[in-house]
Amino acid sequence: MKRGAWQRVGLVAVLMGVLLVARFAIPTLIATVREAISSRLSAAVERRLLRPPPALPIRPGDYARFPRQGFGFNWSSDDKWGVDTFRGTFTTSLGASWDTTIALALTEAEMDTIYQRMIEIRLFDFPEPSPPAWGALRGPPSRPEIRFLVQAGAVRREFVWHSGEQPVDDDGSASSGFRS
């Protein structure tokens, strides 16, 4: 064969090699790139979903409306457990007829931290009831009633929920089980 013919054969062989690589390697490369992009996007979306919402700005008037003096809370259930910072106690039930109450006084620093957080999330401004009352309940409560009472100065808020009942909204869908 002449030199030009060999060059054409060589060029055809190179082109065939490129086509074979393109046929098999490019889809693999595309799949690899697609997977890398997908995992990065998935991680970015997950980070965004798991990120806490931005903090609400502190309103200086809240410290006057809800003073630290007299601040405390009582978190309890009707099956005999609870933390009462007003009395400085923790109570738990050890059986059908045994209750145990111990002294559990939180430090001023711990109470300051809890107070600050409740001001930050504007707990005292939560609407009543929260969420609005439901039209019906699906069955009796299967778990105890939980109560959370918080007070700052003269302002008191009490939240009550049943962890096992299935409240139903007006549209028939299940609700969260939390009310104020």
Image: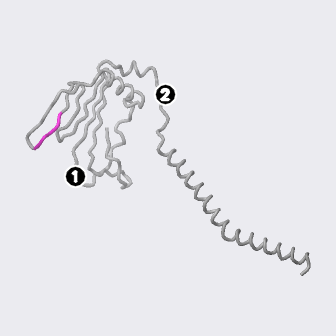
Q: Is residue 8 left or right of residue 68?
A: right
Stretch of the chain drawn in magenta: 91-95
Q: Which residue is mark 2?
A: 57
Residue furthest bottom as drawn: 1
- Secondary structure beneath disc 1? loop
Q: Residue 140 got which mark?
A: 1
Q: Residue 136, how many percent across, how many down?
A: 29, 51
Residue 92 within the segment the image draws in magenta: yes
Mark 1 or 2: in front is 2
Q: Which quarter of the rendered picture does the C terminus lie within?
A: top left
Tell me the chief SS of the magenta region. strand
Q: Residue shown at 71%/72% (left/top)?
A: 20
Q: Amino acid at mark 1?
A: Pro
Q: Which quarter of the figure has residue 75?
A: top left
Marks 1 and 2, Cα distance to the nearest angstrom? 41 Å
- The residue sitting at 27% across, 46% down in the picture is 163
Q: Where does the image place residue 4, in percent across and percent down from the top left?
A: 91, 75
